[in-house]
Structure formats: C-alpha cells, structure tokens
Image (cartoon, helix red, strand yellow):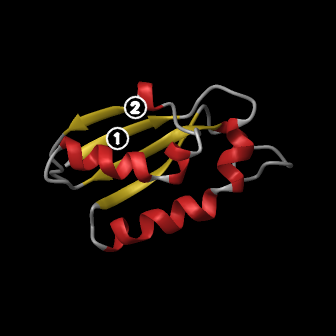
Amino acid sequence: EYLLLLPDHASPTTLPTRLRHRASHLAHNRPHIDAHRITFGGPMLSSHTYTADDRLGQQNIIGRIHLCRAAGEVEVWVMVAADPYATLGVWDLGAVEVVPMRVLV
C-alpha cells in the first residue's frame, strides 16, 4: 500500500481547472476504486474554514490524498500520471510524495 500526497500547483488557474474537470477525474478513478486499487481519497485542505459562498470549502483545496494498493511504486506512478488532474497540470507532480505503508486499522 502507498499513501499519496498530491499537492496542487500554487496558481490562480489551478482551482478553476480542478473544479471544471472534477467529473473526469472521478470517472478516471472509478475503475481503480472498484478494483480496490484506491481504497480512500479526498482533498487536502488548507483549513476547515467555510463561508456562506463556499459551504463545501472548495476554496481551501490544496491537493489530494489517496491510499493505493499496487504491486510497486511504478504502478502507482502510472496511475497518477494518467489522472486528468496530472495531465491538466492541477497537481504539482514534482512535489508528489509516495509513501510506502501498511494499513493495520
């Protein structure tokens, strides 16, 4: 298993690009989720601050976290590289952290 920290680029165009292509990102990952290659995931947030205009806290998204099951780190990188958030430049691939781990609880 691997914990992936997938930070977004710090750019004013990143969040609009992320939100515009969220459906394609989710569709891309659906087969990985169904096959239990991605066992959890969600956005990384700068804070848990919400406003009347942003009740979901989308303005606080700074990246994504995934827990992946894979045969090795190369397989993880293949999954990451094919994700629309990677191909569209949302994620800062140079700052991605892939941490080998084992889930116990």
At horizontal 70% and vertical 41% (from top left) the residue drawn is: 15
Residue 100 place in picture, x, y as percent: 18, 38
* Residue 66 as seen in the image, left or right of residue 101: right
Q: Kindly identify which residue carries mark 2.
A: 96
Q: Nearer the viewer, residue 71 or 1?
A: 71
Q: Kindly identify which residue carries mark 1.
A: 4
Q: Is residue 49 visible?
A: no
Three-letter amino acid code at disc 2?
Answer: Val
Q: Is residue 63 visible?
A: yes
Q: CA distance from mark 2 to mark 1?
A: 7 Å
Quadrant placement of the C terminus:
bottom left
Per the image, label 2 sits on a secondary structure element best described as loop
Answer above or below: position of 23 versus 42: below
Q: Earlier in the sequence, mark 2 or mark 1?
A: 1
* Residue 100 as seen in the image, left or right of residue 35: left
Three-letter amino acid code at disc 1?
Answer: Leu
Q: Residues within 10 Å of mark 2 (few under 14, many from 20)?
A: some
Name the image quarter holding residue 93.
top left
Answer above or below: position of 27 versus 48: below
* Residue 3 as seen in the image, left or right of residue 20: left
Name the image quarter holding residue 25.
bottom right
Residue 80 place in picture, x, y as percent: 38, 47
At horizontal 23% and vertical 50% (from top left) the residue drawn is: 75
At horizontal 34% and vertical 74% (from top left) the residue drawn is: 34
From the viewer's perspective, is the residue at label 2 or at label 1 nearer?
Answer: 2
Residue 98 place in picture, x, y as percent: 29, 35
Q: Residues within 10 Å of mark 1 (few under 14, many from 20)?
A: many
Q: Nearer the viewer, residue 69 or 24?
A: 24
At horizontal 62% and vertical 58% (from top left) the residue drawn is: 22
> What number is the disc on residue 35?
none
Per the image, label 1 sits on a secondary structure element best described as strand
* Residue 9 as seen in the image, left or right of residue 39: right
